[in-house]
Amino acid sequence: MSGVASIHLVENALLVSIQDDVTDTEIIDLQDALSNRIADENVDGVIVDISALEIVDTFVGRVIAQLAGISRLLAAETYVVGMRPAVAVTLVELGMYLPQTRTALSLSHALAQLRRG
Amino acid sequence: MPQTGTATILKIFEADFGGIVEEWRGTQVEEGVRRSDLFTDSESRAQNIELLKAFLTGIRSGVHEQDFSFEDTAWEDLRAVLADLTKERVSRGVTPSEMANFVLALKTPLFSRLATELAGDTDRLIAEIRLVTRLIDAFAIYTNEVFIAEREQIIERQREEMMELSTPVVELWDRVLTLPLIGTLDSARSQEVMENLLETILQRQAEVVIVDITGVSTVDTQVAQHLLRAAAAVRLMGAECIISGISPMIAQTMVQLGIDVGTVSTRSSIRTALADALRKVGYVIEKRDAH
């Protein structure tokens, strides 16, 4: 199954889980949908779960970085959670350190950090 | 047309196998390649006999016309004996040239016997000597190849062991890991270290990682680069990296080299780093009042 990943509201944050077979167009649609939801629902944070993602390229890396920039402008923090070791190594090798993005080990860690403010 | 085959050499062997062994051993002593300090007399005699028998088996069925290849099944015995013998010799510290000369010493007894056997037939003698030389040279080269392969195996094994030994990730406390780095940090090793660290973070769900560089001999731009990349990868996974063990000397060097650690926290000792790490995961270290 594919299609645009569903966005859930958990506490005061939007939760998105990115699937491994995500396409470039889907991820652009997701960026658009997320931007709208952040503005509409006035959330504090966005949590992007990428634990299913086994391969990243510069494109996905850039979209994640952009997402962080967009949500910051709309007054929300972006957390990337569950990044796999191989993905982390690849991103670093590509020079994408995602400085604007916050990271957490898991969804619960991210929620705990959001609650702390 | 002189008939050159293995017949003469086989005849020589059959006639006086024991004599050849003794004379070969004598030549080994003359050439100084018999390591009586490493092997006892009976031990090396048994080895020599076994090796020569295997060689003889090979000659008997492994030489076709003038051609032979040690990869043939006919030479299977010799390969097996050589493998065992080489393993033992490598572990006792025999050098490659000693190993080659040890085999080449076989020429002396064989040539003198060939000369006696074919005294009146010079053409045939030369042809036979040519064949025997080729055989023994190939034997010596093959021996050296086995020898080197054995050594390479040892080196490879030691390298792997060193790699494993040098990258231990230790769980200091619940959700706190430490990685004490020792020695030099090159690209291959830092890659290994990084992968090992990230995997452990995932397994233990660690929140703080202390990379201790007290034991790293030199920190240059490249080493710093490796460390900072590791720290960045740790952050991407959602954990925090503290680099500890930065001596005043290293701090000065890093500043002079213009290395910017960015947002990575650094501490001078693992002690302060540990206190920090524990605070981050919600513990405090407290001194108990003396009663």
Image: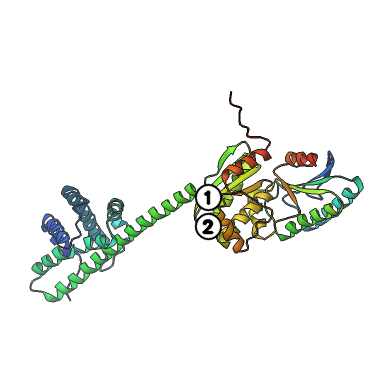
**Along the line of sight, which residue is nearer the eye, B228 or B151?**
B228
Marks 1 and 2, how far apart at CA: 20 Å
Amino acid at circle 1? Thr
Element type at marker 2? helix
Pointers 1 and 2 within a single chain: yes
Q: Nearer the viewer, mark 1 or mark 2?
A: 1
Using residue B184 as the reference point, say whether residue B268 is left or right of it.
right
Using residue B176 as the reference point, say whether residue B119 is left or right of it.
left
Image disc number at residue B214: 1
Vertical comparison of A7 with B133: above or below: above
Residue projecting furthest to the top: B291
* Residue lying at 11% horizontally and 65% vertically, measured from the top left: B113
Residue projecting furthest to the right: A40
Q: Residue A20, image x and y in percent?
A: 72, 50
Number of residue marks: 2
Image disc number at residue B133: none
The quarter of the picture where residue B145 lies is bottom left
Amino acid at circle 2? Ala
Give the mark, 1 or 2, whose residue is nearer the N terminus. 2
In the rendered view of the protein, which quadrant contains the N terminus of chain B?
Answer: bottom left
Q: Chain of mark 2?
A: B
Residue wearing tag 2:
B188
Q: Residue B206, image x and y in percent?
A: 64, 41
